[in-house]
Amino acid sequence: MSESIVSQQHVSYLKEESRFKGRLKNLYSWICTTDHKRIGLLYLFVITIFFIVGAIQGLLMKLELMAPGANIMGSESFSVLSTLHGIIMVFAVAIPGLTAVFGNFFLPIMLGTNNVAFPKLNLVSWYVYIIGIIFILLSQFGYYSGFDSGWTFNIPYGILINANILPVVIGIFLIGLSSIALGINFIVTVHRYRAQGMSWFKMPLFPWSLYAAAWIQLLATPVLVIALFMIFAESTMAIGMLDPMLGGDPTLYQHLFWIYARPAIYIMILPAMGIISEIIPTFSQKTIFSYRTTVVALLAIAFLGFFVWGQHMVTSGIGDRALSLFSFFALIITVPMIVVVLNWLGTMHKGSLNITTPFYWAVSFIFIFLIAGLTGLMFGSLATNVYVHRTQFEIAHFHYIVFGSVSFAFMGAIHYWFPKIFGRMYNKKWANIGFLVFFVGFNLLFLPMFMLGYQGLPGHFYDYPPGFQPGNLASSTGAIILILGALIIIINLIRNARFGRKCDDMNPWGGKTLEWTISTPPPSVNFDKLPVITNDPYDYN
Amino acid sequence: MSKNKTHSSGYCTYLWALVALLVLTALSVFITRFELGPCNTAASLLIAGAEALIVLAYFMNLKFESRFYKIMTTLVIVIFLFMLFITFFDYMNRVY
Amino acid sequence: MKTNIYNVPGQDEHDVSKFGMWLFIFAELLLFGALFIVYTAYRSRNPAAFKLAGNELELTVGIISTIILLISSTTMAISVTAIQKNNKNLSLLTLGITILFAIAFLLYKYFEWGTRINEGFLPDTNTLHELGPGTILFFGLYFVMTGLHALHILIGLIFIIYIFFRIIKNRINSENYHLFENFGLFWHLVVLIWIFLFPLFYLIR
C-alpha cells in the first residue's frame, strides 16, 4: 500500500530536495550540506582533481628523467615541481584521501547511525581543507622564487632560500586543523553512535581502522602545528629556534616534524588496511580469519607508530643510541602488519572466491603492501638504512607504501562501493583493463627505482650519469603507462557515475556489513529505523 | 551514567582545592631557596604535576567521570611522555 | 524528516559534546606538549645560559600570575556548579570575578612583556643577539610559549564574556548549561598549562 510514501522516504541522497531557492539552489544544497555522504563526495571531488594535478607533476618529472641532462626542465624547476608534487600528494591527497572520502561516506552507515557526531564541524573541516589547499597553491605566485625545499621543508634550507614558505606553512597548518576536526568527529561517532547491540568487537574492521587513524590524527597533528609554527616564527621574527647561528638545532625541527609525519603514514595506511579487510571477506564469502587479532594489530600499529619517527633521521646526525631505540620499534611494528596480512590470506583460504574488479585491487594491494613492507625492513635496520637513505630506493619504497597502498586501496574501495555510492554500475571490462594497465605501469615505474637506488643513484635530482639510463627509461615508460591506466579508470568511473547501467540491487557483492542493508544509492536519512545488531560483522555461516 | 552527569563537587570542594593548589605553589617556591641541584627541577615539576592532577580531578571533574575518560587521559599523557622521553634520550646520548 | 542524528537510544547531545571537548583538550595538551619538548631539548643543550636568563624574570610576577589564574579557575568551577544548581546570581558573580582576573592576567602579562622588551630581550633585536645563543633561545621560548598561552586566555576571555551575557538573558540556565560546562573545561586546561609554564620559566634556576 501507498508505495509513493515509501519511495518518498527513500529518496536518494543524490536527489534530495534542495532547501535553497534560485538558480544555484542545487549547488548550494551541496556546498552547504551537513549530510556525511555528500561531504564525502565533496572530498572525493577535490581529491580527484588534486590527484590528477599531482600525477601530472609526477609524470613531468619522470619525462625529464627519461634521458640524462636537462631535457624539458632544469634543476630549479625540477626541485620546485618535486616539492609541490610532494606537498599536494601528501597533505592534500593521501592523508585526507581514504578517511575523508570513504570514512565520511561509510563510517556512519557501517555503524548503523544517520550522521557523524558533529555534522556542522564536518562541513567546516571541508572548507578549512579547501582554504588550506588554496594557500599552498598561492605559494607558486608572487615575488619570490618558487618553493623548492622538498615537502619536509629541510630546515634550515627551507628558511634560508627566501622563497614563499609562509603560504605553504599556513596551508598545511589549515589542512592539519581540518584533520584534527575530522579525527574528533570520527572518534566521537565511533564511541557514541554505534547501533544498538554493536559492541566493540562487533564493529566492522573499516570503522576500527578509521578509529585507530583518528587517534593519530588527533594526537600527532598538534606536534606538526608546533613544527610549522617554529618555521613561521623563525622566518618572520627570527626567534632562533631553527637557526644554528642563534643556537637553534635543526634536528629538533626534524624530530617534531617526523613525530607527526611518521604516524601520518599510518593515517594513510590504516584505513587502507581496513578497506582491504572489508573487500576480502565479501569476495571470499567467508568470515575474516581471526577478527580479534586483526583489531588488536590495527590498534597496535597506531600506538607503536608514534615511536618510530627516528627512522627518517638516520643521516641527520642524531645519536646512535637513539637510533638503536628507533630501530627496535621499527622492527617491532612489522609484527602487527604481518599479522593483518596473514589474516587476509587466511580469509581467502578455502573461501568461495568471487574474482572481480574490487578483488583484483585487494589482492594486488597485498602484493604492493608486501614489497613496501619488506623494503621497509631495510629502513628498520640501521646499516641498510644509512646505505639507501635519500636515494631512489627510498623514493621507490615511499611510493610503494604511500602511493601504492593508498591508491590500490582507494581504487579497490571505489570499485567496491561504486554501485552503492552512485546507484549505477561501471563498465567491468574497462575497469579490469584499467586495473591491469595501472598495475603494470605502477610496478614498471617503481621497481627499477629500487635497483637504481641500490646502485647509488640519489633521489630528488633532475640529472644522472648516462650509465643509469636503462633503469630510468623503464621507470619513465612505467609512468606513462600508469597515467594511461589512471585515465582509463577515472574516465570509466566518471562516465558511469552519470550514464552507467542502473544498479538498484541493494547488495550486488553479497556483503554482510550494514551499508548493504539499505537501498542503493543510500537515502538521505540512512536508517528510518535504526538497526539492532545481533551478529558478528562478517557472519557468512 | 545519568547520575554522573549531574554530579559535580560542592562549592567547598572547590575552595579546598584552591587552598591545596596555593599551598603547593607556595611549597614549590619555597624549595627553590635550597640548592639541591637537579633535584630542584624534579621537585618543582613533580609539584606542578600534583597541581595538574588536582585541576584535572576536581575542576575538570575527571574524578566523577566514567572510567573511560580517566583511561583516555592517562593514555594521552603516556604517549606524550614517551615522545618527550625518546627525544630527550636522543639529546642525552649525543656525542657533540 | 530532517537529519535527526540524536536518535540513538541512551545518547544525549550533552554527553557527545563533552566528549568532543575532551578530545579537543587532548589535542591542546599535545600542542603545548610539543613546545615542552622544544624547551626540554634546548634546556638540556644550554643549561648554564638558561639558568642565567631565568634570573632575569621576576619570581613575584610569576607567583602573582599563578595565583590570579588559580583563583579564576576556582571561580569558573563555582560558576558552572552554581548555574547547575539554578543559582544565577552566584554564577554571574563568580563569572564576573573570572572575567576580572582574566583581564588582570592579560594586563599583567602586557606590562611584563613591556618590561622585558624595554630590557632588550625581544627576539630579533641586536641587544638580544649580543647575549649569545642560549639566552636567545630562552627568550624566544619565553615569548612563544607565554604568547601562545596568552592567546588562549584572550580567546577564553571573549568566550566568557559571551557566556556572561547568555546567562543574563537566561539562555544558559539550569536546564541548558552544556556549552558553559564545556567551555569551563577549556578554561581549566589553560590554567593547567600555566601550572607547568610557571616552574619552567620562573622557578627552575
Image (tube, coloured by chain):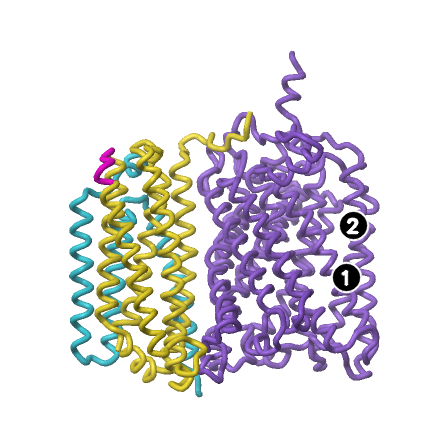
Q: Position of residue C140 (x, y in %)?
A: 41, 74
* Residue A508: quadrant of the picture: top right
The magenta segment: C86-91
**Residue at position x 75%, y 35% from top?**
A424
Q: Is residue A329 visible?
A: no
Name the residue beneath numbered marker 2. A489
Chain corresponding to cyan in the figure: B
Q: CA distance from mark 2 to mark 1?
A: 16 Å
Pointer 1 chain: A
Q: Position of residue A415 (x, y in %)?
A: 72, 45
Q: Image height check: is A420 above or below C67?
A: above
Q: Image height check: is A369 above or below A346?
A: below
Side of C136 where A531 appears, left or right: right
Residue C89 painted magenta? yes
Q: Nearer the viewer, residue A140 or B41?
A: A140
Q: Nearer the viewer, residue B46 or C131?
A: C131
Give chain A's shade: purple
Question: Tag 2: residue type?
Answer: Ile
Discs 2 and 1 lie in a common subunit: yes
